[in-house]
Amino acid sequence: KKYVAEPYKIKVVEPIAVTSRAQREEVIKKAGYNTFLINSSDVYIDLLTDSGTTAMSDNQWAGIMMGDEAYAGSKNFMKLQEAVREVYGFKYIVPTHQGRGAENILSQITIKEGDYIPGNMYFTTTRAHQEMNGGTFVDVIIDEAHDSANENPFKGNIDLKKFENLIDEVGADKIPYICVAVTVNLAGGQPVSMKNLKEVSKLAKENGIMVMYDATRCVENAYFIKEREEGYQDKSIAEILKEMMSYADGCTMSGKKDCLVNIGGFLAINDEKLYQKATQLVVVYEGMPSYGGMSGRDMEAMARGIYESVDYNYIHHRITQCRYLGDKLSDAGIPIVKPVGGHAVFLDAKQFYPHIPQDEFPAQMLAAQLYLKSGVRSMERGIISAGRDKDGNNYHPKLELVRLTIPRRVYTYAHMDVVADSIIDLYKERDKVKGLKMVYEPPVLRFFTARFEPL
Ligand SMILES: CC1=C(O)/C(=C\N=C(/Cc2ccc(O)c(F)c2)C(=O)O)C(COP(=O)(O)O)=CN1
């Protein structure tokens, strides 16, 4: 398979754990069949998440030495503010320790009891903060996004009809903003087209509703627009990203993904009044508006990461490496979410284990089996992650997935081959695998610490 060689060379290495099957059997039992509870020292290839697992560049590490740890008005904040203004185009920026720090503040300053927040598919922390502030999340993504085999090139798109129906149903004054995730994590890292962003922005403006992006993987989204959307092939990633952001009133950002850092995030806003409300809260939850829970050195690393992230060679390799894994799996007949997303390959556990009913947690079991087989850690993104509704009933998401999340600039194609080969082996033994029962269920965001036993 043709692939794009890494546009960087390795300068520092971090040995990884080569384990035996016997060791892994001990580990998975102790971890209650939950990959979140496995120690990093017992993991060979860690595809749990792309969040905070990035390898920073030498330029970013050099920035760590330039930390201005002044409590107020740090030089690094000025650098970060300049980077966000230049690359994203937003006027005001409130640094936070990570994405959910921004989600917490945005939700508190915009959502009132009884409000509705439309969005393109839910995300766990985003929906949690919206609900904690009395809002109700309403999924307005196109239907195709819930069909893992559908190859629509922009499966993250908002269904304008659904958005309009909600406005007619509840009234625009009950909708503080529409949350547009670019890309859509749980749909399989699927992008939103520029055309759809423009249309959403127009409809929202006509109704006095703000548009807030969850910009966590926005550079990946820009790459897909360049690759797939008419009229953008000759534009740079930076130009596309800037245009994307111009259709939003602000964004929350988990810097731990597309800003290429291990910690950090921000809330960016154009409206001055909203910015002032945000600064009143950031001092309560994160710290001064000029550091927001980050050290000076981490703000410097994130500022430098923002500039690096729009380099074509970086993002071209990043997306291509992910697609390499996806193509190798689908060529071998393994059921995955199509098209392959920007940050991960998602295994369709419902099709992988058709004999295991969703209430026996097929995706949870598949992630455990993959660890047992090869020490590769992945993440359940199915019924366990979906949690329970207000009446305490399990949500039954159409997508019962295992996410193989590729950290940025960390693994080589050889690691991708190990992952692919072990999944292909697992598929051959799929009939022998049984489901799980949950033996410990925490009340909130249960997937992080729940424990299971084989049936
Ligand atoms: C699209 C989006 C995210 O992907 C995201 C985080 N993502 C994680 C970490 C994670 C989060 C929640 C889970 O249920 C989970 F199991 C994993 C992840 O692996 O994908 C956040 C929040 O950004 P923070 O992590 O910087 O606070 C906001 N928006």
Image (cartoon, rainbow, N blue to C red):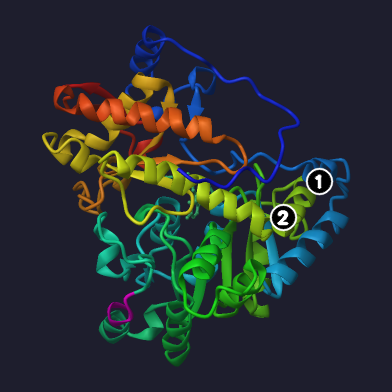
The answer to if 160 sits in the magenta stretch is yes
| Residue 398 seen in this snapshot | yes
Query: Quick one: 8 or 272, which is closer to the camera?
Result: 8
Q: State the CA–CA distance, disc 1 to disc 2.
A: 9 Å
* Marks 1 and 2 close (CB-CB < 8 Å): yes
The residue carrying mark 1 has its beta carbon less than 8 Å from ligand 1: no
Query: Quick one: 295 or 218, which is closer to the camera?
Result: 218
Q: Is residue 49 left or right of residue 363?
A: right
What residue is rendered at 45% in x and 32% in y? 417
Residue 415 in the image: above or below residue 104:
above
Q: Position of residue 399 (x, y in %)?
A: 26, 50
Quadrant of the image containing the N terminus? top left
Q: Which of the labelled discs sits on residue 59, or is there none? A: 1
Disc 2 marks which residue? 308
Quadrant of the image containing the C terminus? top left
Q: Quadrant of residue 13?
A: top right
Q: Position of residue 48 (x, y in %)?
A: 46, 36
Q: Secondary structure at mark 2?
A: helix
The answer to if 266 sits in the magenta stretch is no
Q: Is residue 391 left or right of residue 229?
A: left
Q: Position of residue 318 (x, y in %)?
A: 56, 49
Residue 41 in the image: above or below residue 294:
above
Q: How many marks?
A: 2
Q: Position of residue 397 (x, y in %)?
A: 23, 52
What residue is rendered at 60% in x and 77% in y? 243
Q: Which residues are drawn in magenta?
A: 159-163
Q: Which of the labelled discs sits on residue 249, or is there none? A: none
- Type of amino acid at the residue the image marks with label 1: Asn
